Every structure is written in C-alpha cells, then in structure tokens.
Amino acid sequence: MEKTGTRKQFRHPSARFVAPLALLLLLLPAGHRSAAGEGDTGGRGPGYRITEVAIAVPDVTLRGTDGRPVPLRVLLDGGRPLMLQFVFTTCPTICPLLTGIAARVREDLGKDKAMILAISITIDPEHDTPSVLREYAANFDTDPDWLFLTGRLEDIVAVQRAFGSYLGNKMNHPPYTFLRRSPRDPWVRIDGIVHADLLEAEIRKMIGTR
Amino acid sequence: MTVRSRGPAAGREQRSLAATALLAALLAALAGAFSPVLADAPDASPEGTPGMRMYREGILPSGKKMRGETMGGAVLSGAMAACANCHRRSGMGSFEGGTAVRPITSAALYRPSELYGPARLDRFPPQAGTMQWPAYTDQTLARAIRDGVDPSDRRFDSAMPRYALADADLALLIAYLKSLSTTGAPGITEEVIRFATVVDARVPPERRNAMLGVLQVYVRIRNQGSGAARKARREALKDRDAPWPEARMWKAYRTWELDVWELSGPPDTWEPQLEAYYRRRPVFALLGGISAGGWGPVHRFCERHEVPSLFPSVDAPVVSGPGYYTVYFSRGTELEADALAAHLSAEPDDVRRRPVVQMYRDAEVGKAAATAFRKALERSGEPEPRDVRLPATGDLPTRILEDAWGGERPVNSVLWLAESDLRRIGERTRSTPLSGRIYLSSTLAGTAAAAAFGARNGEVYVAHPFALPKGKGEQDRIRLWLDSRKIPAGDERLQSNAFFAAAIAVEALGELLDFFSRDYFLEKVEHMVETTVTPSAYPRLSLGPGQRFASKGSYILRYEPESGGFLPVGGWIVPESR
C-alpha cells in the first residue's frame, strides 16, 4: 500500500527559472509512460500507470449543482463502484480532456454506466459555484449517475489533500482518475490522460462486466 | 505499495536527461514563437473574423460548434474544442498538469523546431525528438489539425484533438493562425515600456494621491537599483548572441514609464479623452487607476484596443458584456449585494421576513449597488426591497429616516452610502431610533462608520468583501514597505491595491522575457495571482483563464458596540453571481 507520496515530487517552487524545470518534472511520469512503449496499449496512446492508494476521505459536506448539501463520505460509501476526478471549469488543458474522456467512457459503457457513480469535484470552488458547474456539466452528456460537486474552499482543499492531488495551485494539478469498486476495496489511481478505451477496460474489470 | 506499471521503468539518469531536453525544447519553442516587429497592432473588429471565432470560441463560420476528438478518445465541442482553450489567445501555448501545449504562432510553426543549436542535439535522448520537426507548410499544418500528425509523421500526444474541418473552414483557421502575435505590442520600444494609470478627476486629491504615490514610487524604484544594473547588463549584451535564457532575460529589460491619464468631466466624455491620450503615446498596459463612479468607458477602451488593465480601484466595475482585458479585484458593490442577499436568506424567519429598505445616492455606484441587490433578492426569492433614492450630491433630506423607518414593524435597512452620509444619519438616529438591522457597505463607507450609530449589539452589520479588519497593533506588510520608502499614509486599501497592481505587472513581465505580447501578459497574470506572495487587501485572490474578478466572496461583519470590534457572521460567503 502506498500513501499517496507524490506530493514532494510536485512541489511548487516560486523561482522563475526553477518553475519551468519543476513543471517539467511533472513530465517524468509521461517520460516513464513513453518508455513503456505503445505495444502495451494496443496503439492507443502512451502507457499509463495504476497505483493503489490509501485515502482517508475527510468528513466534509460539499454541494451539488442544485446547491444541495452532499455529505461526501455518505456519498462515496453508498456502495456503488466509483470514478472520481478533480477538475475546474476554466482549466485550459487537462480538465476538458479528463472530463471528455469520462464522458466518452460512460457513453461506451452503454447500459452498464448506471453501475458506476461518476464524480467530478471542482478544485476552484469560489469560481465554480453550483450554477457555473451546472453550465459546465451541460457540455457533456450527464445524468444522475454523474455528479459535479463544489463546496467551501477549505473543504475542497482537504479533499484534494486526502487524494494526494493538492499542489497548492489549481493551474498545476495532476491528471488523475480515481476508481474504487466498493467501500471495502482500495482506491486505485490512474495517472495521466489515459485513452478512453483503456479506462473503460479498467472500469469493466472493476465492475466485472468484461 | 502496489504498482502495476505498463512497461519498464525509466532510469533516473535517463529521466533527468529527458527533463533537461524537454525544458530546452520548450524554451526553444517559446523562443521561436515570437517575432518582435515593433509596430502598432491593428485593432480587432469587435465581432472578429470567422477564423478568430473558430480559434477563440470554437464556432464554425456556419454558426455550428467546432468538434474535435482527442487521441485519448475525448470528444470536445464549442468553446472546449476552441484552439484558444489550450494554446491560449496569444497562441503561445500553456503548461498545465504535466501537459505542455506548444506555441502555434506562425513564427513557431513555419520554421523548423530546433533545440537551441544543432551542436546540442546529440546530447538529448530520443524522447526529445518529439519536440522537434521540420517547418510546417499549409499542407502539413492542415494534416496536423485534421489527423493529428506532425510534419515528420509522428502522432501528437493524447491531448491534441483532431478536427474534421471542411477545406474552406480550415483555410480560414490557418489564415488566422498566421496572424497570431505577429506584431509587437504598442507601448514597447527598444528602451522603454510604457504604462498609464487612469484617474477620474472627480476623485478627491487625498485618494488620488494615495493611489498615484505608490505607483510612482514603485516605478522609480524599479528603474533604479537592480533595474539600473539590469540595464547595464543589457547594454553589454546588446550585440552579442549569448545563449538562452540569460541573453533573452537581459535583453528584455526596459525602463518603465508611467503616464497619468486624468479624465475630466462626465464619464460620457471619457472615451474621446482616452483615445487622445492613447494616440499621443500608446501604452502596453494600464496599471491601477481610480474612479469616483463607474468604469465603463475605460473598460470599453481597453476592449477596443486590447490593452490589458490590471486591478483598478473601482467600486462598480463592468460585470456584464465583453470583458477580457480588464482584471478587477472583485465585483465591488455588486458582490456585496449578492453576499447580503445570501446572508439574509440564511437568517431566521423573524429577521428575513422583515421589509427591506435600501437607501442610495442617485449616482453610478449607488444605483449599480441598489440594482444588483434588488436582483439578488429576487433571485433568492426574498421580498422586494423598498428604494429610498437620495439626490446624487448635497444634503440629505430631513425626513429621510422617518420615511425609511416610520412604520410600526422593524425593517432591515441597507445603506449604500459613504461614511460622511452615514455619520449624519447616525446623528439623527439619536432622535429617531431605528428599529431592525442596518447593513452598511464596506466598499463605500469602510467599517469605521458602523460606530456612528448609537446601536445595541446585533443591529449594525457591514458587508465586507476584504480581509478581516486588523486588530490593534497588527500592521500591514504594505505599510512597512510604504514607511520605509517615506510614502505618506493614505487610504490603506487604495495603497495596497496600487502596490498589488504594480507588483503583479513586474512578475508577469518577468515571465514574458522579451515576448511582449499583451495577450501573453494577461495569460501570465491569470496564472500567477493565485500563487503570488504579494500581499493585498483581500483574504485570497485567484484567477484562471478568462476569470476577471480575483476575489469572489465577502464577509458579513456584525458590529460589537461595546468592544468597537467586528464579528464575521456565517464565514466567508461566496454568492452565486448570476
């Protein structure tokens, strides 16, 4: 078991010329994936990395796109398999891709998509109020099995920390997708912008429909 | 620990070499992305060209949404599929979450992508090769956009979408790409970078000087000391082609000049005045600025000429309609109005069901605040407020209090008034005691005016979209900076606002090196506001692509007459803004 120990690697420096170098260190997993070769992924982009992670979900109450309170632990422990991502609506690059891939995976899962609960949590909650998130979600084919959550900044930061996704700056957040079969199973973290087909395969493995 | 990895792990040495190569390649890509031709950029027409709409908004000439499918299988459309989403308005690209987005200006595309100097090539591992390619042609660029393949037949990584565009649409888009960041920005010469700050002549001298004093000292210090050293270094390197990045850093040095654009007369005469200033001496950007009322004409001027404007001190900024080039601290009194409405809806029924009376001066800021509050109450389903509109200037009517509070039931009064008005009303409340709560605007009146009301606990509240008031003995970091530079104390918020605007401009310019693109400048500002160490009057500031209001919340403070202090009620409130 690994406690999400990647934070050190992603520390955010302030020095001007150190910053790009450190940002490039973020590419290391990418370099690693490149080294994995394309054969492993059936030609669908670079390889990717899956890690089991221990996550202690904080007892916070977030809000849905209707503004209603959503106690996070209750939601996550509802029993269904989960797919969870962190995004924000004005994100220039990776969030639309992560969200787009999540949308594609759900589409490809067909009727099986109702077996999993998809959750996208904003990491920019003061901008992404419930109505802003609602508009963002409308860009994708969403339904009650895909929740977009916001909340108080402190709570959102606590959740990101628990998932090892907090780097102190929303513009520099790692592209992770988290999966969990049930409350009794460990969380699994997928690093990088993995191809929708591969993510779908991982999910099918998890829910046992392959 | 369980790690299932899809391939052999890369060695540490190989990794660090790869990182170095990627860094070099990225810097080289940026270096090639900008061709500084010092000429006035043509002003864009307001609706833009069809190519620009495709690039910025993801809208096809037919009006349909552009669609792209990424290598990762994500299907994006409309604004999310727009090129500018990742490559940004400047075309200079971005870097986020480990994904490097390449510059796509014509200078970057239509010449070979090289690391800096062929001699270095053999030092980098093959991974770096994906950062290199021969120069694009229109044909290979079309193929790249449609099929996701670069000129050397390599596929792009998982982030770049492929767009199935018709020939005509593709030609329009490529023509637009060729126009990105091709001309140097106005306000830049080989020696000087020029800024201006806009001052509304109606602003009282002490407030105007508080803002101006800080900016002018900041610029003077910038040009002396380390600035002088940089300038000397730059002169020494002028004719030498020293290796990147040092040379570019030194060569980027410019002496700062700050013009003061004073606007006189009513705001509807401001735009021609701004145009005249700009024609006489164009500027790269506006810093700070101060208004006694609205900011519409300045905002529109900046949109028209694509002039970035950083953090003016305005109480009623432009919150709707086009707004890309002005970056505000917050929505000002409109934010207070929304926060107040949210606060009232969360109060117990005996408080929230009371009638609401709002008083305001019949001038820009007062009207904007009252309109916003009325809308916010309506949105949250609260009772409609009764308006007490006071003349724009001059004495308050004598019967104002009786008119507002004369009824038998307690009311919630929201006073969109300045401190001097509040003090006069406060005196009169001694003969006409209020019944209910009074809400004040910290933006318009500060917090001290709360003491003007001979109130009991729980009766006077202040909407306060700033950091909590300082306790006794607490000193502002800004204050220390000002004192050490012998800048007289003035309005603290104005001084710290001006300081913040200048400091962020310095930081953002430092990132630009000598790629003096205004759009790129704004993109850097968007990125750094969240992480800057520069203090401000706000508890937290943060922007993102396209975000133009850095602080999004407000406290509602309850005045405690016995201690003279304030207590935040319900924490930091971030209201919905629409």
Image (cartoon, coloured by chain):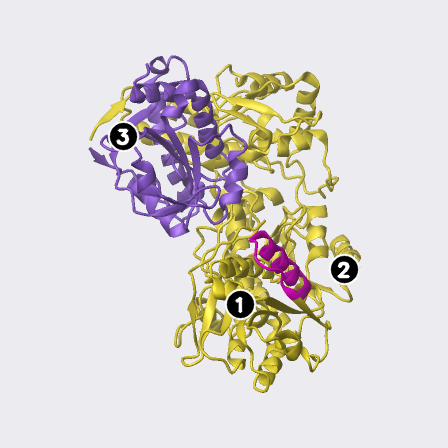
Label 1 belongs to which residue? Answer: B493
Residue A80 placement (x, y as % from top left): 32, 29
Label 3 belongs to which residue? Answer: A182
Which dot marks residue B44? Answer: none
Q: Quadrant of residue B78?
A: top right
Q: Nearer the viewer, mark 3 or mark 2?
A: 3
Query: Residue B47 or B139: which is nearer the viewer?
Result: B47
What's the amino acid at mark 1? Arg
Direction from residue B546 to residue A147 in the image, left or right: left
Direction from residue B215 to residue A101 in the image, left or right: left
Query: Residue B107 or B46: which is nearer the viewer?
Result: B46
Badge 3 element: loop
Chain painted in yellow in the figure:
B
Q: Are marks 3 and 1 on the same chain?
A: no
Residue B217 placement (x, y as % from top left): 56, 67
Name the residue at 37% across, 33% down.
A84
Inter-mark Cα distance, 3 to 1: 52 Å
Q: Main secondary structure of the magenta part?
A: helix
Name the residue at 58% across, 83% down.
B429
Tell me: residue B473, above or below residue B98: below
Name the residue at 53% across, 80% down.
B453
Chain painted in purple in the figure:
A
